[in-house]
């Protein structure tokens, strides 16, 4: 029996002359949470749609729960998914929508109220879908994805529209599911959230995999970063030039200069800035977080 929830080799999808996904190769171990990240247009949703049998790959192979993606009917009964936002009947209640989907999919309707409670919609079960906020619609979409009691859960931007409390609740739910043996493959633009919950990571850039592996391995492999600010933004260009002139990779982001370099170089940086007439208002050596690593590896700013 395979010990991977997802395994793909050279998976590709071409639209005309454009390669939406190019020779993607990665694995997601069973019972883990794997974050799936990349800039907009990098091929995340296309990859998920291929894995679910919604579109046919141009090339490559893949397996879901030990079954070839050429035969999605063999694994889809064990997979729950929410891709590109949920869609439900506006005039039906949340409970009625889930019961309809359960009946359609051949799943038990006995778990509907439990699932609504699990995603925080228990008290709105009888409210019509058209009265739901965006965050509530996302919660119902997650509940629908859980109807099969899946071994693999695939979610595309599940926290879209949720407030901070809702995001925290989804994070706890996904962690609980993984602890109980469900494999979770989740994309999100909230990289700080993925950093908190993901065991593994797959990172795409322009349709190509630029990293696949343990989250911890990626973070430990990163260069320390020195974050510096002057008295005002007009001094950032000078600080950037100082860092690059000393042979360090640097960029301006979020009103500060981010410099790759050892913590001890911060003293030299401070001295060079002072000699250039700049008194630093911030000089902070730190290890990069996932967001900074993402920007570095994908070229996003």
Image (tube, helix red, strand yellow):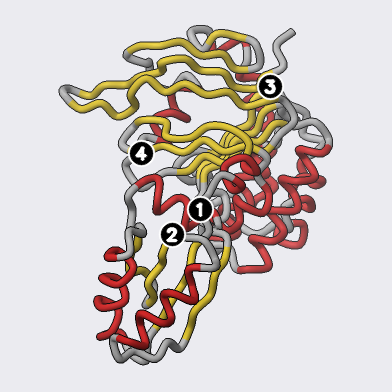
The residues tagged by marks 3 and 4 sit, at their Cα atoms, a distance apart of: 29 Å
Asked if the residues shown at circle 2 and circle 3 are in contact, with their CB atoms under 8 angstroms apart, the answer is: no
Dot 2 or dot 3: first in sequence order is 3
Dot 1 or dot 4: first in sequence order is 4
Determine crowd level at label 4: few under 14, some 14-19, many 20+ residues with C-alpha closer than 10 A: many
Label 2, secondary structure: give it.
strand
Asked if the residues shown at circle 3 and circle 4 are in contact, with their CB atoms under 8 angstroms apart, the answer is: no
The residues tagged by marks 2 and 1 sit, at their Cα atoms, a distance apart of: 6 Å
Asked if the residues shown at circle 2 and circle 1 are in contact, with their CB atoms under 8 angstroms apart, the answer is: yes
Left or right of residue 201: residue 204: left
Residue at position x 60%, y 50% from top?
A: 194
Residue at position x 32%, y 49% from top?
A: 299
Determine which residue is flagged by label 3.
Answer: 78
Against 11, residue 269 (above or below) is: below
Dot 4 or dot 2: first in sequence order is 4
Dot 3 or dot 1: first in sequence order is 3
Q: Nearer the viewer, mark 1 or mark 4?
A: 1
Determine which residue is flagged by label 1.
Answer: 223
Dot 3 or dot 4: first in sequence order is 3
Left or right of residue 79: residue 114: right
Determine which residue is flagged by label 4.
Answer: 205
The x, y position of residue 234, in whole percent, is 25, 85
The C terminus appears in which quarter of the rendering? bottom left
Label 3, secondary structure: give it.
helix
The residues tagged by marks 3 and 1 sit, at their Cα atoms, a distance apart of: 40 Å
Label 4, secondary structure: give it.
strand
Dot 2 or dot 1: first in sequence order is 1
Which numbered disc covers residue 174? Answer: none
Which numbered disc covers residue 260? Answer: 2
Label 1, secondary structure: give it.
loop
């Amino acid at each position: 029996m395979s010990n991977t929830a997802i395994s793909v080799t050279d998976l590709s999808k071409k639209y005309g002359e454009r390669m939406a996904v190019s020779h993607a190769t990665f694995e997601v171990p069973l019972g883990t949470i794997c974050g799936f990240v990349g800039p907009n247009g990098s091929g995340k949703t296309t990859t998920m749609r291929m894995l679910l049998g919604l579109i046919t790959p141009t090339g490559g192979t893949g397996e879901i729960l030990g079954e070839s993606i050429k035969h999605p009917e063999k694994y889809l009964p064990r997979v729950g998914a929410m891709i590109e936002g949920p869609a439900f009947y506006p005039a039906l209640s949340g409970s009625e929508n889930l019961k309809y989907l359960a009946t359609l999919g051949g799943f038990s309707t006995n778990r509907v109220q439990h699932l609504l409670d699990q995603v925080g919609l228990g008290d709105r079960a009888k409210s019509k879908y058209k009265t739901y906020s965006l965050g509530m619609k996302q919660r119902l979409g997650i509940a629908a994805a859980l109807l099969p009691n899946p071994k693999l859960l695939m979610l595309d931007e599940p926290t879209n529209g949720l407030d901070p409390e809702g995001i925290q609740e989804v994070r706890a739910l996904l962690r609980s599911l993984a602890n109980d043996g469900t494999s979770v493959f989740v994309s999100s633009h909230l990289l700080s959230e993925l950093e908190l919950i993901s065991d593994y990571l797959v990172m795409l850039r322009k349709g190509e995999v630029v990293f696949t592996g343990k989250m911890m391995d990626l973070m430990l492999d990163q260069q320390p970063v020195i974050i510096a600010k002057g008295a005002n933004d007009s001094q950032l260009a000078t600080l950037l030039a100082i860092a690059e002139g000393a042979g360090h990779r640097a960029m301006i982001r979020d009103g500060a200069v981010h410099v790759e370099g050892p913590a001890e170089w911060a003293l030299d940086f401070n001295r060079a800035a002072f000699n250039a007439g700049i008194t630093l208002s911030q000089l902070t050596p730190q290890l990069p977080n996932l967001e900074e690593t993402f920007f570095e590896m994908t070229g996003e700013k």
